[in-house]
Image (spheres, rainbow, N blue to C red):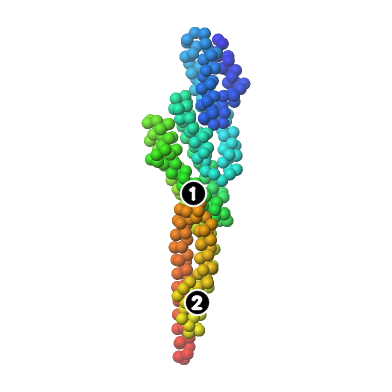
Amino acid sequence: CLLRPVLLDVQQRVPSVFMPTYPVQFAENYAAAQGFIREVGAGQEAYLMTASWLTAFEAKWKTNVYFSLRQREIAQQVRRELFTREENPLAILRSQIWKDAGALARLMPQLIPRCLHLTCDLLSAWQGHISSQTMSGSTDPGLALSFCKDLSTVSSELDPDAAGGLGSDIINIAGEEMADGVTQLLAVCIDRLKRQVSEVEACLIKSLVNAVVPKLEGVKQIPVLYRMTAKSAPTTHSAYVDNASSILTDFAQKYSKDYSDEVNKVLIRVGDECAERFAERCKAVLEKEESLSRFTHQTKGR
């Protein structure tokens, strides 16, 4: 008689008292709230503490009410914490969602699927933020490299086989019954992260190639000019090549210290692309020169 009105009053008037933004805070408050419920019921008959309506209240309190009331607040706080600085979301995932493994496993295992859903939402929002920053083609190279490094770091952390990684921790929290499903979900997340690394790299490579190739235009004229003047063509790098390669040299010197692996990977692909584009243009010039030579020879013969 005393316990039920108290619980209904709490549920109707001040639900937010027990329902903070993140699951880890909720776990702490829920543990304290259990003590409150037991104290209110102290001295009553034993059946009051196991009544079906009390069990239903606790279940609703731990799942539906919590997320329905706090979904918008979660989105706002995540956006504020994540997108006001260029950092990956690992810190939020570890400190705010998966911090207290014991509380999730013992006190509220019903929240584990919700935590997985929130994790995927957070990763998706972060990847959307990266796409908006990198797809324009005018992204700062340092920012693009930092995104590549962070995406790779997060994908490695989510790998279930990585010892001490977040992925293995999540599977341990979820337990054997959910292990297969969680592993598949993490695999999808990792695949999306790796594909986005390739997309960001492609945008960065395109911008570098577009900066280097026009500076190589003069190189293809050198053989023609030296033949016209009956001089030997130089065998060392010309000013044209040095001017073009300086773009890549400056890029490597500026960013190799913080992003060595990412810079090396990008430079290899840029070099291959520039070499291929330059070879195609030189071939076109030589074919044009040969055609002109034949035309001149035929004209003189007549």
Identify the residue shown where x is 53% and y is 52%. 144
Percent x, y of residue 15: 59, 23
Screen quadrant of the N terminus: top right
| Disc marking residue 222 | 2
- The quarter of the picture where residue 18 lies is top right
**Amino acid type, residue under disc 2 in the picture:** Ile
140 relative to 68, above or below:
below
The local crowd at label 2, few if under 14, some if 14 to 19, many if 20 or more residues have their Cα within 10 Å, is some
Count of numbered marks: 2
- Residue drawn at the location 40% of the way across and 30% of the way down: 175
Hey, what amino acid is under mark 1?
A: Lys
- Which residue is disc 1 drawn over? 149
Q: Quick one: SS at disc 2?
A: helix
Whole-number angstrom distance, CA of label 1 to CA of label 2: 40 Å
Q: Provide residue 132's location: percent of width, then percent of height.
A: 56, 49
Residue 118 in percent (x, y) is at 51, 35
What kind of element bears circle 1?
Answer: helix
| Residue 101 appears anywhere in the view | yes
Q: Is residue 224 above or below residue 172?
A: below
